[in-house]
Amino acid sequence: MKLSHRITHLTGGGSDGWDVFNRARAMIAAGETVTELTIGEHDIRTDPAILKAMHASAMGGHTGYAMVPGTGALRDTVAARIAARTGVPTSRANVLITPGGQAGLFATHHAACGEGDTALFIDPYYATYPGTIRAVGALPHAVTARAEDAFQPRAAAIDMAAAETGAKSLLVNSPNNPTGVVYAPETLGAIAEVCVRRDLWLISDEVYDTQVWEGTHLSPRALPGMAERTLVVGSMSKSHAMTGSRIGWVVGPPEAIANLILLATHTTYGVPGFVQDAAIFALGEGAALEERIAAPFARRRALAADILAGQNAVGAVPSQGAMYLMLDIRATGMSGEGFANALLDAHRIAVMPGESFGRAAAGHIRVAMTIADEEFAAALTTLCRFAASRAEAAR
Ligand code: PMP
C-alpha cells in the first residue's frame, strides 16, 4: 500500500543524522564496548522520590483518563513557575501540559503554520526540527547561525528569510542543542523585533533552561510585545531527568492554548495523571533538585575546559549551557561525519557529527557530557589525541 508523501518524506530524504549513533548501537548489540557521547540522556535515573510520588498517585487511583489540558494543579504549578522565572503574568489558561517537549514542538508548529506555510528555524538545530515542521504540512526553512559568530543568529538574516518566504513562525532554542550556546539578550531582543516587524510566531524551545553555565537564560516571552506571539516549549526531561516520563508543556496566549487543547483532544488525549502528579512533586522540590541534576554537566564542562586548554587540534565553541560541547575539528581536514566514524572505528568512542544538526555545524562534532566524570575525561583526552594525530597527518 502506498503511504502518504508527508510520512515518507518526513526526514526530507537522505540521512536522518543518526547514522553514527546507529552504528554505535549496533556495535554495542554485538557485544563491543563503546563509549557513548551521543544523545542527551542523563547518566542518572529519575530520582526515587519522584518515582515514589508517581507510584503513590497511581496506587491512589490516578490511572484513568486525566484532564486533556493537564490537571488544574499541574497547570497552576507550571504557570507559577513560569511567572516566577520570567516576571510575565501567567495563569492556567496560558498552559497546556504535553507528553514531552517534542509533542510541544509539533503542537506549536501546528498552531502557527497552515499547510504549505514556511516555518523558520536556526541551523545548527536539534535533529527533529525540520521533520517536525514537515509533520504539520509546513515547509522548513533554515537560517544559518555561523561558527564565526559563535553560533549566535543574526537578526538581519532572519529578517531577510522572513521577507523572502512570508514565513509564519520562527523556532529558536536557547540554551542551544547542539552548540551549547546561550543566546545573548541583544540577540533575543533583535530577534523579537523581527518577529513583531514580520508578524511571526516565535516558538521558543526552552527545554534546557535549568542548564545555564554562563550568562543568564532569557525567555523571549518576557520581551516587550512578545507574550502575545510567543509559544514556549518546556519539558521536565532535562531539568528533572524525566526523559522517559514524557512530560512537558506549552505556554502561550489563552486563545492559542484553547486551540492546542482541541489538538490534544484529537491526538494525545492528555498525559497520564500519575506522571502529572509526579511532576507536581518534582517541581515542588524547587531549585535544589534542578541544581543537583545539572551539577554533573557543570563539573564535566570544567574538566573539558582543562583538557581542551592543553591542546590545539580541537577548537571549542564557548560552552554556556545545556549538556553538550560543540567542538571544531576542521584542523583535521575531516568532516564531522568522517571524524565521528573514524573515531568510532579507532577508539570505540561515539560522538555526533555536526552535519547531523545542519550545514552550519559542518566540520564540528557534538559531545554529550553524559557519562561518569573519569570516563568522560579519558574519552575526551583520547578524542583530542586522535584529532591531533589527524591534524598532523593533514599538514
Ligand atoms: N528540544 C531540544 C532542543 C531537545 O534537545 C530535546 C530532546 N533532546 C527536545 C526538545 C525534546 O525533549 P522531550 O520531548 O524529551 O521533552
Image: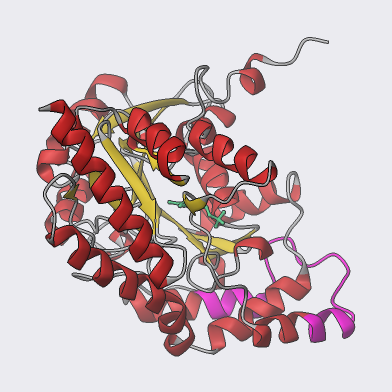
- Residue at point 23%, 60% (across, down): 319
Answer with left or right where residue 66 lies relative to residue 368. right
The residue located at (13%, 61%) in the rendering is 309
Q: Measuring from the top left, give residue 31's x and y in whole percent.
A: 67, 47
Query: By what rule are the colours in the image chosen?
Result: secondary structure
| Residue 197 visible from this viewpoint | no
Q: State the image coordinates of residue 286 (x, y, percent, origin top left).
A: 47, 88
374, 45: nearer the viewer: 374
Q: Which image quarter: residue 98?
A: bottom right
Magenta range:
55-78
Please say whether residue 332 is visible from this viewpoint.
Answer: yes
Q: Is residue 13 above or below residue 174?
A: above
Looking at the image, residue 294 sits to the left or right of residue 116; the answer is left
Q: Determine whether, in the image, residue 178 is placed left or right of residue 24.
A: left
In the shown orientation, is residue 212 left or right of residue 284?
left
**Quarter containing the C terminus:** top left
**The quadrant where residue 225 appears:** bottom left
Q: Is residue 68 highlighted in magenta?
A: yes
Q: Nearer the viewer, residue 368 or 380?
A: 380
Image height of 380 relative to 287, above or below: above
Q: Tell me where residue 315 appears, x and y as whole percent.
A: 16, 47
Q: Residue at x 13, y 54 (%)?
A: 311
Q: How many marks?
A: 0
User: Dividing the image into 4 quarters, which one contains the N terminus?
Assistant: top right
Looking at the image, which residue is at 60% across and 68% down? 242
The foreground one among 261 and 53 is 53
- How far across and down, in percent of the image, does residue 45 sit? 61, 73
Q: Is 238 in front, or is 20?
A: 20
